[in-house]
Image: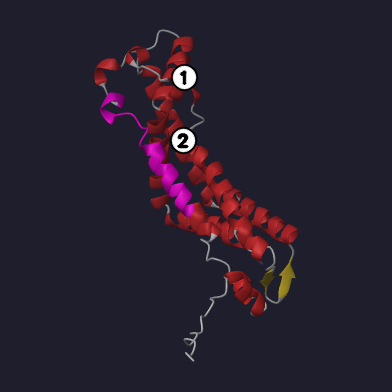
Amino acid sequence: MSSSPAILPISNPQSPAILSAASGGSLQSQGPVTTPAFRVFINQISESLRHGLSQRKPWAELADRTAFSKPESLSEATLRIRKNYSYFRVNYLAVVALILGFSLVSHPFSLILLVGLLSSWIFLYLFRPSDQPLVVFGRTFKDSETLILLVLLSVFVVFLTSVGSVLVSALLVGVALVCAHGAFRVPEDLFLDEQDNVSPGFLSFFSSAASSAAAAAVPVAART
């Protein structure tokens, strides 16, 4: 009488669903590590800045001395400014940003106050988890109270310190320089693409960056 061959035990690996159910849902609670909303916000701003700067026109074309002439009337100057801004939009905004940055660097106290104000908005309101209230000196502040405090702080920093005057003076100088260039630059040799005419502007990256950061923060809030 021949003996039957020995049956080897076969281990059947359990699926992740069974393992998570057996462990009381511990694996389910450990979701994938997501990028923080603030990091997504910074990355989106960097990508949008690079994309916007890639659309700038050649600086040699902006400073072409042979294309300058005095406008014959105010209406012609206004028309030139409008056409030149549509064509040199990114270059103009870069010039204004450089003037603004130079003004802030030359006034370190205003720069420190402005950076502190922006950091307060970012870390105390925009990217602060909704389930973690703001606690200062043992007192808990609601979201509405935090918003009121930040608005009051912004009014104080902008209007009651040198920050407001530095920002306004730098913006006025930048806008005046852009308007002077646009009024004296003859736009006859400029060819506007259809994309240039419908472009929403160089600073539109703020809205896209904020929406991307908000979308990234939704799964984090859902898991908490």
Tell me the kind of residue under disc 2. Answer: Phe
Tell me the kind of residue under disc 1. Answer: Arg
Location of residue 69 in the rendering, given as x and y in whole percent from the top left corner: 32, 13
In the image, 144 versus 172, the foreground residue is: 144
Quarter-of-image position of residue 195: top left
Whether the magenta-drawn stretch holds residue 56 is answered as: yes
Is residue 71 placed above or below 4 in the rendered structure?
A: above
Residue drawn where x is 46% and y is 35% of the image? 202
In this picture, which residue range is highlighted in magenta?
A: 42-62
- Res. 126 in view: no
For marks 1 and 2, give the one nearer the viewer. Answer: 2
Residue drawn where x is 31% and y is 16% of the image? 68
- Res. 183 in view: yes
Number of labelled discs? 2
Residue drawn where x is 51% and y is 53% of the image? 41
Location of residue 107 in the rendering, given as x and y in whole percent from the top left corner: 42, 52
In the image, 24 versus 99, the foreground residue is: 24
In the image, 7 versus 192, the foreground residue is: 7
Q: Name the residue beneath numbered marker 2.
A: 202
| Secondary element type, mark 2 | helix
Q: Name the residue beneath numbered marker 1.
A: 82
Whether the magenta-drawn stretch holds residue 182 is answered as: no
Disc 1 packing (10 Å; few <14; some 14–19; many ≥20): some
Which mark identifies residue 43? none
Residue drawn where x is 57% and y is 71% of the image? 15
- Specify the quadrant that holds the C terminus: bottom right
Give the main secondary structure of the magenta stretch.
helix
Quarter-of-image position of residue 138: bottom right
Answer with mark 1 or mark 2, whichever residue precedes in sequence: 1
Location of residue 113 in the rendering, given as x and y in whole percent from the top left corner: 51, 57
| Secondary element type, mark 1 | helix
Disc 2 packing (10 Å; few <14; some 14–19; many ≥20): many
